[in-house]
Image: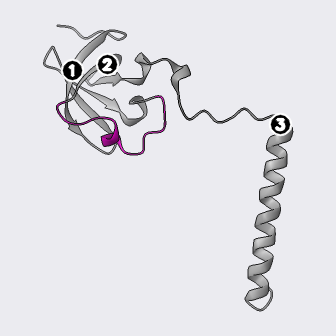
Amino acid sequence: MSIEVGSIVVGEVTGITNFGAFVELESGETGLVHISEVANTYVKDISNFLKEGDEVKVKVINVDDDGKIGLSIKQLEDPDDRIDHAPEMSFDEKMERFLKQSSERQQDLKSREAKNGGSSN
């Protein structure tokens, strides 16, 4: 069976690494779901999402000339389901936040300098 980019196939997770999960497809070929293609949210530890032996539905996103198959789980999900969207902020709100954080950092540096007996210049 030839694996085509864009096709949706089922496979079994055969290995977990810190950079992704290896999935054996029904065709017997093995592909990789990179950690960035696991879910529509930040994935720090892939084992929180997948385990060896899990059956997963994946989308083929690329097939290299050397036969390596790139897979995605998140591209099957609705991007609007992403759970960690940052709230939309206007430019003015972002600038106000930046200035507040900057001021707090400067104040912290000044207090550390005072505790350490003055400037090291």
Q: Quadrant of residue 23?
A: top left
State the residue position of label 3: 91
Q: Could you give the CA–CA distance between mark 2 and mark 3, rounded to whole angstroms?
A: 38 Å
Quadrant of the frame with the N terminus = top left
The question of residue 68 being in magenta is answered with: no
Marker disc for residue 58: 2
Rendered position, 33 above or below 45:
above
Residue 120 visible from this viewpoint: no
Q: Which residues are magenta?
A: 40-53
Residues 8 and 56: in front is 56
Q: In the rendered structure, which disc, 2 or 1, sits on the residue that comes first in sequence?
A: 1
Q: Main secondary structure of the magenta part?
A: loop
Callout 2 amino acid: Val
The numbered disc on residue 11 is 1
Residue drawn at (34%, 36%), measured in percent from left and top? 49
Check disc 2 and report its element: helix, strand or loop.
strand
Q: CA distance from mark 3 to mark 1?
A: 45 Å
Q: Residue at x 83, y 45 (%)?
A: 95
